[in-house]
Amino acid sequence: MNIRIGNGYDIHRLVGDRPLILGGVNIPHSLGLLGHSDADVLTHAIMDAMLGALSLGDIGHYFPPTEAEWAGADSLVLLGKVHDLVRSLGWRVGNIDSVVVAERPKLKPHIDNMRSKIAHVLQLEPNQVGVKATTNEKLGPVGREEGICAYAVVLLSRE
Ligand code: MG
C-alpha cells in the first residue's frame, strides 16, 4: 500500500484565564481551552490522524500529560515532531481535512491563518490543509460552550 488514511478527534474544556489557541492561532475570546499543553484541539486531532494512519498510537503516548516537559507546550512544535516521525518512516502528508466545532467565537476570520501555520510546519501548500468550522447548534457540551472539539482526517503517501 502506498497510501494510508488516518482520523483523529480531540476535545478540551473551555475555562476562563486561558488563551484560545486553534491551529496555532491565538484567537481573542473570553474563554480558552484547558490542557497540559496549549490545548490546541485542532492540532491535536491532526497529530492523532497522522499517527493513526501508520497505526502508531496516539499523542498521549508520545507527549504524556504527566510529563513536565510538555507543560504549556506549543502544539505546533509537537506537530513538527510527529511530522519528523512520519517522514523518518518514509511517508509524507498528501492532504488534511478537518473541522473545528465551536459555538463561539466566530472562527472564519482565522481559518486561513490556521491553514498557513499548519501547512508551514508540515511543509505543505495551504491548499493541502482543509480547515472548516461549524457550531454544534447549541446542542450538547460543545453547544453549551463547555468545550471545543475537532475532527481530522489525513492522507499519507509513501515517499
Ligand atoms: Mg488534546
Image: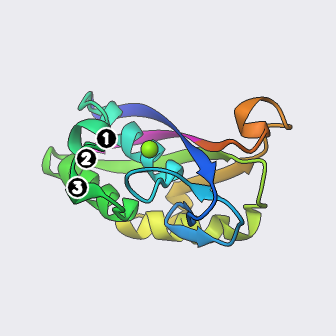
Majority secondary structure of the magenta segment? strand
Q: Quadrant of the N terminus?
A: top left
Residue 104, label in figure: none
SS for dot 1? helix
- Name the residue tied to disc 1: 59
Pointer 2 residue Cβ closer than 8 Å to ligand 1 = no
Q: Name the one closer to the observer, 92 or 101.
A: 101
In this image, 139 relative to 95: left or right?
right
Residue at the outermost front position = 17
Whichever of labels 3 and 1 marks the residue nearer the N terminus, that label is 1
- Name the residue tied to disc 3: 68
The location of residue 88, given as percent across then percent down, is 13, 50
Mark 3 closeness class: few <14, some 14–19, many ≥20 residues within 10 Å: few
Residue 63, label in figure: 2
Quarter where residue 62 is shown: top left
Tell me the amino acid under the disc marked 1. Answer: Ile
Pointer 1 residue Cβ closer than 8 Å to ligand 1 = yes
